[in-house]
Image (spheres, helix red, strand yellow):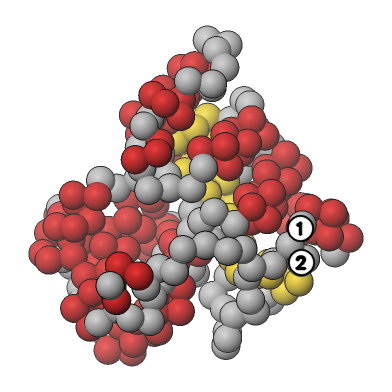
Amino acid sequence: MRSWILLPFLATPALAEVDLPSLINELRDTEVVILGEIHGNPAHHENQELIIRAIFPSALVFEMFTPEQAQTINTMRWDGATLDSLEAEFEWDKSGWPSFEFYRALLEADAEGVVYGGATPLSQIAEAAFDGAFAIYGPDGIDYGLDQPLSKEEISKREADYILTNCAALDDGDLAGLIEGERLRAAVMADTVLLALSEAAYPVVVITGNDLANEDYGIPAMLRKIYPDILVTTIGQFEFEPVGDAAYTHVLVTGEVEKEDPCLDFTE
């Protein structure tokens, strides 16, 4: 059964008032906790930090970091170094992600958890948009069903979700490419989660956008293709209550923040 938690913009105190202990206990009993976000919403990052501090995961898997960046973070932490230089070292201002401080706060919330990076190179995402996820992932993509075309129903569902969460100005070609890129990213993230489980045990916390946290076709769906009985809890975070049946174990609804219109690139 899905739970809905309505939060004000400053979400941390309110989360504690809506039976956080019960939610935390459930998360401690699961193998993988996938914490979605709208990138750059401070309340969503605060909720992630609060949950990480409460369940103290063995590993943190980030959509935003490459495997090389994750290894740099681990080495610095094992050596007792601060993370002060990472923003410049990673050239974070060129990454396209929100402020590095959001993710640094999550790293500091679990100073002993092993960090894993599941970022897919942008060049591969672009190639998948043209050639399909299976062509880029390779033959093992059969395990994730990447070799199989999606049904018309699933394509329609994904298109509606992506228009809602990304941009209503996307045309059919953009949507088809986006879907294949997301299939590739979900498979790569699932690989990273399984690696974390094998090396660092559980619970594993995953930091990602709401699209990849989606139970129907995101990381959880990929994981269950490999291990059908894996225990996964997903938390989607939104600024408005989603329309229809949201595909997450729990949904947190916070206040809206001002941000650049994602449709600008398609309408200008």
Quadrant position of the N terminus in the picture? bottom right
| Amino acid of disc 2 | Leu
Q: Are marks 1 and 2 in contact (CB under 8 Å)?
A: yes
Quadrant position of the C terminus in the picture? bottom left
- Is 214 situated above or below 111? below
Secondary structure at badge 1 equals helix
Residue 73 visible somewhere in the drawing: yes
Give the residue at x 45% y 79%.
164
- Is 192 situated above or below 79? below
State the CA–CA distance, disc 1 to disc 2. 6 Å
Q: Residue 162 is drawn in which quadrant?
A: bottom left
Give the residue at x 46% y 17%.
75
Q: Residue 249 is drawn in which quadrant?
A: bottom right
Q: Which residue is mark 1?
A: 11
Q: Position of residue 115 (x, y in %)?
A: 49, 32
Residue 220 visible somewhere in the drawing: no
Q: Position of residue 99 (x, y in %)?
A: 51, 42
Give the residue at x 52% y 49%.
207
Q: Farthest residue toward the right?
A: 17
- Is 87 situated above or below 217? above
Q: Position of residue 174 (x, y in %)?
A: 23, 74
Q: Which residue is mark 2?
A: 7
Q: Nearer the viewer, residue 217 or 30?
A: 217
